[in-house]
Image (tube, helix red, strand yellow):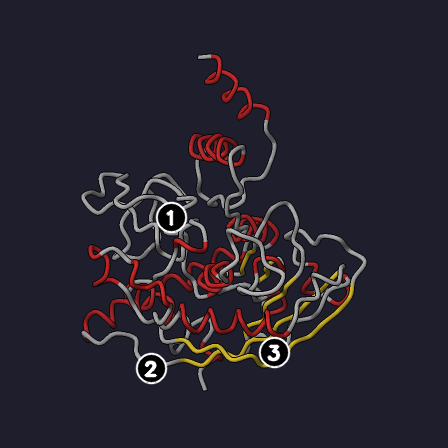
């Protein structure tokens, strides 16, 4: 009882930002997530992605963004319906040029070209289902595994030294006026900023529908790639896979709410984020016998324990590149 009261008191007094809260998360869910996160962090380091926090802040600053994202969602549902009716999946490899913007304060943060290339290689394996650990997917989910058919090519690397020790999540790293680096042709290239975000945050991404001036992904250097200046348990390049998934309009697999909806039909409903390396099956939200798809890249498990996307996630992501989609300009 004492521990219970102490935890409840912590929730009441805490004013910390929950890293991946949903814009529609109710107070009870927020308190539960905060309480659970406190207990987890006392034991080990957990994945922290700030994409939903950034989205919430952007919506507060620009109320019109909600309408834009509603349009993206409407277009996505129409695309999914057409794909289902035609019985033909979203096919054909789409090449995405990548610009890596490295902003460093220390020599270690000025990551090598080899480390950068290792991340490009990881993205290409993960998004083509050619990763060596794809065989670890439980047999219950193997039929859902999908080759997303994206090929990432390194277009250029831009480097800049800075006196700033951390950048936060307010997009300052994306602006030369604020000491960062402006994006390079963001309507046809995926920009990734590699800089120390701080606050234990591994990365964050901008969802389709936002401003092109801030479009892209941000990742702290020690979680980028799988060689060089990397830190376990997030040292296999899966932070970028997760964040690029957000850039492709994929949500967290638990829908950022208790037993929420990630808008993808072939990912089981699950109660909340999974951390570390859960044992299969982990049943929540009455999703037995197979339970959570915690090995999906859009969960919060450690790098070594996430290794698949689904066919539904592929179709959802491809909608933004279709005619009228938010990223249609990426098509040749």
Instruction: In the displayed orientation, state which residue is furthest to the top.
Output: 1
Of tags 3 and 2, the one toward the viewer is 2
Decide: marks 3, 1 in contact (CB < 8 A)? no
- Total residue callouts: 3
Q: Give the quarter of the image for residue 85.
A: bottom left
Q: How far apart are the alpha carbons under marks 3 and 1?
A: 31 Å
Q: How far apart are the alpha carbons under marks 3 and 2?
A: 23 Å
Q: How far apart are the alpha carbons under marks 2 and 1?
A: 28 Å
Q: Name the residue under label 3.
A: 185
Q: Which percent across, then down, holds residue 232?
A: 53, 52
- Of residues 165 and 332, the one nearer the viewer is 165
- State whether residue 152 is above or below residue 170: below
Decide: marks 2, 1 in contact (CB < 8 A)? no
Q: Name the residue under label 1.
A: 255
Q: Name the residue under label 2.
A: 92
- State whether residue 322 is above or below residue 176: below
Q: Which percent across, then down, holds residue 323?
A: 39, 78
Left or right of 295 in this view: 38: right
């Amino acid at each position: 009882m004492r521990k219970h009261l102490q935890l409840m008191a912590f929730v009441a007094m805490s004013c910390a930002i929950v890293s991946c809260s949903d814009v529609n998360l109710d107070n009870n869910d927020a308190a539960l997530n905060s309480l659970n996160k406190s207990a987890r962090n006392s034991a080990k380091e957990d994945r922290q992605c700030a994409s939903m926090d950034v989205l919430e802040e952007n919506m507060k600053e620009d109320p019109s963004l909600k309408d834009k994202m509603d349009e993206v969602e409407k277009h996505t549902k129409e695309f999914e319906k057409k794909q289902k009716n035609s019985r033909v999946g979203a096919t054909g490899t789409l090449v995405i040029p990548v610009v890596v913007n490295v902003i460093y304060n220390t020599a270690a943060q000025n990551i090598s070209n080899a480390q950068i290339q290792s991340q490009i290689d990881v993205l290409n394996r993960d998004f083509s289902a050619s990763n060596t650990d794809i065989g670890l997917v439980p047999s219950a989910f193997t039929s859902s595994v999908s080759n997303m058919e994206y090929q990432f090519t390194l277009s250029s690397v831009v480097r800049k030294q800075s006196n700033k020790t951390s950048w936060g999540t307010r997009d300052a790293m994306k602006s030369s006026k604020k000491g960062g680096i402006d994006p390079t042709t963001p309507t046809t290239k995926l920009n990734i900023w590699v800089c120390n975000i701080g606050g234990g945050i591994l990365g964050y991404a901008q969802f389709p529908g936002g401003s092109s001036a801030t479009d892209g992904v941000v990742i702290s250097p020690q979680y980028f790639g799988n060689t060089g200046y990397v830190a376990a348990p997030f040292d296999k390049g899966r932070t970028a896979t997760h964040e690029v998934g957000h850039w492709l309009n994929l949500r967290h697999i638990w829908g950022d709410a208790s037993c929420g909806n990630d808008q993808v039909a072939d990912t089981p409903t699950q109660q909340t984020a999974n951390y570390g390396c859960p044992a299969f099956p982990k049943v929540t939200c009455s999703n037995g016998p197979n339970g959570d798809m915690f090995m999906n890249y859009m969960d919060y498990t450690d790098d070594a324990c996430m290794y698949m996307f689904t066919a539904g996630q592929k179709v959802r992501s491809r909608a933004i590149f279709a005619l009228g989609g938010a990223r249609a300009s990426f098509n040749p």
